[in-house]
Image: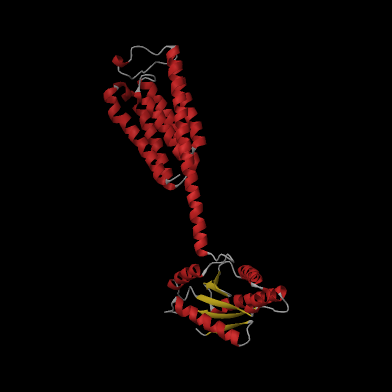
Amino acid sequence: MTNKLLFNAATSRFLLAAYVLVLMPELHPGLSDERPWVLGYVAVVAVEQWLIWRGVGGKVRAVIGGVVDLVFITALVHWVGSVTSVLVALYFFASTINTLVVGSRIGMLLTFFGATLYATVVMLAATGTIAYGPHAPLGLIAAPPTFAQGVLASSITVVLLTVSNLIVGMLVSTNREREEALLDANARLETLSSRDPLTSLYNRRALLDQLHVELEALSPKRPLALAMLDLDKFKRINDERGHSDGDALLVRIAGVLQRTARESDVVARYGGDEFLVLYPRSTMHDALVGAERLVAAVRELGIEFDAQRPVSASLGLTAARHGDTAVTLLQRADDAAYRAKREGGDRVVQCAS
């Protein structure tokens, strides 16, 4: 349910109440006697509008609003003549609004409720149990409907209401299915645009977007650190065991990095055998603890994967400082990772910030 649709539904109720209060007494003078009931309906509509504005009640509120509408429409139709009044068309309008707001299934139940109310009023008038059109101009109504006329009017209205509601419900369901399919497709596209297809980690673009956000928010109370992780001896795996094994190892390393990192850390594949880890709200000391865990986790996995050719990680770590850009921060992390590799790999090297 969209707020726009809910507000439009409430607006239509106010317009109906205003029509009954201002214009209809000119055509049906007796309706002035029912002004308290109309004002009560306006009060209910006002409360519902306030609940919509506050976001309270959800579908239950919408169902109650639909029931109130149908009861008011039934009273209005009874006052002016249930068989001869064009206001019977309000049932079709209410049925459409209800289906749009609460969905086809509940909308159909409300339609049956409204049809039952109408049929009851018509048959009560046809049998003389209640007065027919007590506030209708006398010239427009010669006599109440006969029993047969009441049955015919009720049957036609019930059938037309049901058929029209089924059509609207089918259109609503089809439209919602299309909307859901579009949302799913957009979600998949978003995933494809932000995730590495091999490892399912964030890709370079997604991490750079997050890095720009964090750099803009950088402050003494919101520090930031970045790690560049470069695998040691990974090329040998590809050369001696094949790229399929190399890809399998990358996937396993990605999983280890994701599990070892904190929930707040952002792990991404930078390209090839390089990974980036963003440490939001972390000092160099905080990030160093996490970086050491990552290197140890890769070391353990490398031995498990191939003890004869164990892969390890060279990790460069740097902290962001005032005036840094994504380029300068990445360059420092890359330089530190290169130093770690030159010093033998399987270690963390910090870049002085």
Q: Quadrant of residue 286?
A: bottom right
Q: Position of residue 8 (x, y in %)?
A: 37, 41
Q: Position of residue 58 (x, y in %)?
A: 48, 43
Where 78 sits versus 42, above or below? above
- Classify residue 182 as left or right of residue 197: left
Q: Position of residue 350 (x, y in %)?
A: 56, 83
- Classify residue 253 as left or right of residue 37: right
- Classify residue 184 as left or right of residue 14: right
Residue 57 visible? The answer is no
Q: Could you say which is closer to the camera, residue 253 or residue 81?
A: 253
Q: Quadrant of residue 23?
A: top left
Q: Could you say which is closer to the camera, residue 333 or residue 110?
A: 333
Where 48 sits versus 141, above or below? below
| Residue located 29% across and 22% down the image | 29
Which color mode does the image show? secondary structure
- Classify residue 175 as left or right of residue 13: right
| Residue located 31% across and 21% down the image | 30
